[in-house]
Amino acid sequence: MTLTLYNTLTRRQEPFETVEAGKVKMYYCGVTVYDYCHLGHARACIVWDVIRRYLQFIGYEVRYIQNFTDIDDKILNRACVEHSSMEVVADRFIKAYFEDMARLGIKEADEYPRATHTMNGIQRLIHELENKGFAYPADGDVYYAVRQFAEYGKLSGRKLEDMQAGKSERVNVEDPEYQKKKDPFDFALWKAAKPGEPAWESPWGAGRPGWHIECSAMVRDRLGDTIDIHAGGADLIFPHHENEIAQSEAVTGKPLARYWLHNGMVKVDGEKMSKSLGNFTTIRDLLDRGVDPMAVRLFVLTAQYRTPIDFTDEAIAAATNGWHTIKEGLLFGYQYGKQLGWGVGSGECGVGTGSLLPETIERFQEIVNNDFNFPGGLTVLFELAKELRREGNIIVHEGKTETSPDELKRQWQTLLTLAGVLGLEVEIEAEADKSNGLSDAEIEAKIQQRQEARKAKNFAESDRIRDELQAEGITLIDSRDGTRWHRN
């Protein structure tokens, strides 16, 4: 059951082998903090959160770093509009980021470096590039000489000669920055300060770093020359990740990352998400509308992480229904554990590794080990949850189970474990508050009243009782053997 990953760099699926046995160094290109996080950020953060959880589940020690880009034109523009500062804007949206991610159940990274806190490392890297002939100063700016790096384009598959044809039509030769460059493909490592903008002192004069050099420096400072996994959205492959490789590998002579992983983009009703189309949805807007955070997680995990996904009302409704199924399974032990003799309270129904179903765990791993196939892994969770839901209904209506209590406990604890790997967790206290409505005995009494009304052909009263129960979250199922019910 070897874990294999699709590597964007090699364009093939490869066995996963780390630089240091048993340890994973993983870096995710995080958000630029000038606004609230949107659905695209939700997908990326959920994907890399679950991948990190899974690597830990199969025994790796993972050091997970996620950066914040807190120097950027968009941040400066927002600060200007708000008559504020770049630091104030960045701090506000970093705080908002943590609030949103907590609601989605995202585990915090081991460290969150910020570009503004990595200035020494950034300048040191630029200086080394300059000394090795890969960078040159120009009137306070410093540029990377792309043609000096022979492997430029190896990640994206782009060739400079192919890009040259269309580039000439898009370049404004009157642009001062263009005139400073020795080659149109060169990109900025350091930008000279403009009036009124934040700036840092450097050997090339006051200024600020370019975007690409920030990540190269943060990776090197926190994780070293070569890491195991470099992760990010597919939109970052070119130019951002391509430029990271050119910067880092020109200095170290070593691979920046062994595996480059990229998540697919999010569309909304088939369209690219954008503010101009009016389909731009932030995480907090979505959750404030009442969408369950776990349904959002499930929606993301039902698609292979590298493929695009389409956010629609139908898709989120299906994910919500799916989450209700898994949630019923997760609640099984807390609802019926005492009745089944598992312990005095739910606190004694915890997970023990010896009480899991090894064949089920093995099947889950075998599926997910194929390039993090979480959609396939979810099928294992649904099988367990549906079986536990069926047994729960039997307990309610017949007072017994068809499966031994010990086997049910193993099924439930296996479901809890695998759901935890995917970050699908139920809030027991919140569910207890919801269930403070009708007791089982009160429900059975209502059903008896309804049966009597039906015998008397008082169908209006029968329908009223059914609707009353439905409003309390109780669904009735009539059959030849009588009426069964379950809580929604």
Image: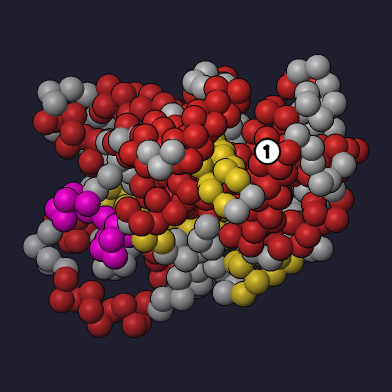
- Give the x, y percent position of residue 127: 46, 45
* Residue in front for this viewpoint, 269 or 29: 269
Describe residue 108's horizontal placement relative to residue 101 as left or right: right
Residue 282, above or below 248 = above
Q: Does 277 appear in magenta? A: yes
Residue 258, image quadrant: bottom right
User: Residue at 17% of width from left, 61% of height from top?
Assistant: 179
- Image quarter of the N terminus: bottom right
The answer, for residue 453, to whether it is visible in the render is yes
User: Residue at 34% of width from left, 82% of height from top?
Assistant: 162
User: Residue at 54% of width from left, 63% of height from top?
Assistant: 304
Alpha-carbon neighbours of circle 1 within 10 Å: few (<14), some, or many (≥20)? few
Magenta highlight: main SS? loop
- Give the x, y percent position of residue 235: 38, 60
Residue type of the residue flagged with mark 1: His
Residue 468, above or below 146 = above
User: Residue at 19% of width from left, 76% of height from top?
Assistant: 168
* Residue in front for this viewpoint, 216 or 449: 449
Describe residue 97's horizontal placement relative to residue 167 as left or right: right
The answer, for residue 283, to whether it is visible in the render is no
- Give the x, y percent position of residue 165: 25, 82
Residue lying furthest right: 354
* Residue in front for this viewpoint, 104 or 343: 343
* Residue in front for this viewpoint, 469 or 50: 469
Q: Does 468 appear in magenta? A: no
Extent of the magenta region:
266-279
Residue on which the image places disc 1: 397
Residue 43, above or below 155 = above
The way the protein has been coloured in the rendering is secondary structure
Residue lying furthest front: 456
Callout 1: SS: helix
